[in-house]
Amino acid sequence: MLILLFLLAAATVSAQAPAPVQGLPYLRPVWSRVADLNGELGSVESVEFSPDGRLLASVTKYSNEIAVWRTSDGTLLWTYPTAEEQEVAVFSPDGKWLASGGEDRVLRVLDAATGKLVLSLPHPAAIDALNWSPDGSRLATGDEAATLRLWVMPEGKLLSSASAGKEAINEIDFSPDGALLLVAADSLGAKVFHTRDLSLAKTFAHNGQSPRTTARFSTDGKLLAVGGAGGHILLWDYASAKLLRAFNFTGQKVETLIFHRDGEHLLYAGHDPHIRVLRLRDGAIVHLSPPVDHAEYVTVSRNGSWVASAHQDGIIRLWVWMRGDPALNKRLHNQLLKKQAQSAPGNPIN
């Protein structure tokens, strides 16, 4: 009987945590924290790293608050209560500010270290998406009325606005050089606007698949990925507007996707019970995370070492990005020794 129980337990663990394959990247769980006290009745809508990776910001759907956590151990540092659901919170590129928006039609900027309110701007419609420009001088918002707005920061002055169509804007992403804004809207495909005046640059649509729920530029700005409600993922070359690949592994809604900093992988998640790692060069799924509740958001730290995810069960999760290379530590150690020797006076290395 004990042997049978042991075998059943082992099988359960195996089913919950697929073994990593040597040479392939994988996600190793670090910690999970309750961000929405309503649990299954709650939901965490987004989670974002600070630029230095030391902090995580989360916002919730039903407990209605903005929170900042310490990445190293998941300690809750501060919370800011709001009247209604918050959809997204993003750190400024210098890590000084945290901008947030949601159903209460208020664009807020908080001090990231203390949670003190710095700026509060009435917004004409509920905010579903926002993001900072790479230089921190602009803040873009997208709302449920399908309007894209660009604000001058830190003054909070409205610079320009444009219609993105007829339905809610779900995500906004700046190109790495800040010249372009990528917008994902419910059933409009993905659109790219010029930041200078919010004029339309390009539209990316394919076979009428809709709605579009998430879209991101690659870290070099050459590619963009778009996710949809039917499980569709589309990978485009930006310059030529050529569709490179179309994927659909689950048929279930893709809520969130992001390119990894290594330029070789794409992470995505949604109503399928896994965070999936897709290899860009051949479209292969190289890793499935252990099963988790529906994911609303996945993000990667700037140095590529950490992944964070937000879930409908009220939990945020931290993962370490493992490269699946058993010789990595030794190789880095040898590189460090060589660097130290080269910098030592009178001791050059060829």
Image (spheres, rainbow, N blue to C red):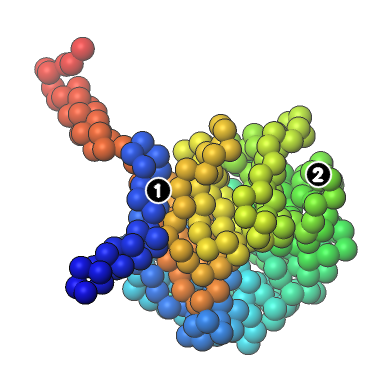
Residue 297 sits above or below residue 248 on the image: below
Structural distance between the alpha carbons of marks 2 and 1 = 31 Å
Going 51% across and 70% down the picture, which residue do you hit?
Answer: 293
Relative to 345, 232 lies left or right? right
Is residue 117 visible in the rendered image? The answer is: no
| Amino acid type at image mark 1 | Tyr
Residue 83 at x, y percent in the picture: 63, 87
Could you say which is closer to the camera, residue 223 or residue 220? 223
Which residue in the structure is indicated by mark 2? 206
Residue 338 sits above or below residue 17 on the image: above
The quadrant in which the C terminus is found is top left
Of the image marks 2 and 1, the number of the one nearer the N terminus: 1
Which residue in the structure is indicated by mark 1? 26
Is residue 319 visible in the rendered image? The answer is: yes
Going 47% across and 66% down the picture, which residue do you hit?
Answer: 292
Residue 247 at x, y percent in the picture: 66, 44
Describe the element under mark 2 as helix, strand or loop. loop
